[in-house]
Image (cartoon, rainbow, N blue to C red):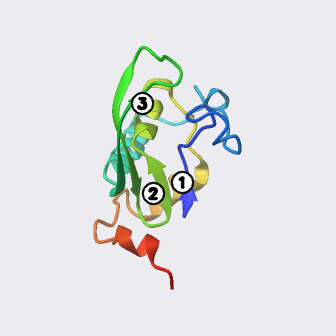
Amino acid sequence: MILVGYFKEQTPGFNDNYDSIYDVVDGFDGSNELKNKIIKYLQSGVLVSVCPTIVRDIIDDAKIIGELSTLTDGVYQWPSDYVYYIERYNLHVSKALIAHMQKNNWKVDQGFDPESLFDED
């Protein structure tokens, strides 16, 4: 599974191997149409887990984003707040992820079984 949308500021000391969100703010270099396709794709991910906690914006702590969940398309995995940060802060989205979404015709396979992530085979 390829992880995207995780940043070291989310849980200091735990995610130190992740990039800083401040390194990707205002890094989106595409049209609004492309950004909207990316957002729609990520929002339609298959739910893997839900964390019963309220998530705050790590750039502006006064803003509450909502509850946190983890989504996937079977290849990539991302936290639900990744969409918020792309929308609000124009985060850079990797060319590899964009190419993957295009290859899937901008549709997440809803038949993917997230329990297969936990198979021990």
Which residue does the numbered mark 3 point to in the structure image?
87
Residue 37 location (% of width, % of height): 37, 45
Image mark for residue 89: none
Q: Quadrant of the N terminus?
A: bottom right
Q: Position of residue 121 (x, y in %)?
A: 51, 85
The residue positioned 31% from the left and 52% from the top of the image is 44
Q: Amino acid at mark 1?
A: Leu
Question: How far apart are the alpha carbons under marks 1 and 3?
Answer: 16 Å
Are discs 2 and 3 less than 8 Å apart at CB? no
- SS class of the residue under badge 3? helix
| CA separation in Å, label 2 and label 3 | 17 Å
**Circle 1 residues within 10 Å: few <14, some 14–19, many ≥20:** some
Image height of 113 relative to 12, above or below: below
The residue labelled by disc 2 is 101
Left or right relative to 2: residue 118 = left
Q: Which residue is mark 1?
A: 97
Distance of label 1 from label 2 (alpha carbons): 6 Å
Closer to the camera in the image, 42 or 64: 64
Q: Badge 2 local density, few (<14 within 10 Å), some, or many (20+)?
A: some
Residue type marked 3:
Glu
Side (left or right) of 109 relative to 90: left
Locate residue 71: give its quadrant. bottom left
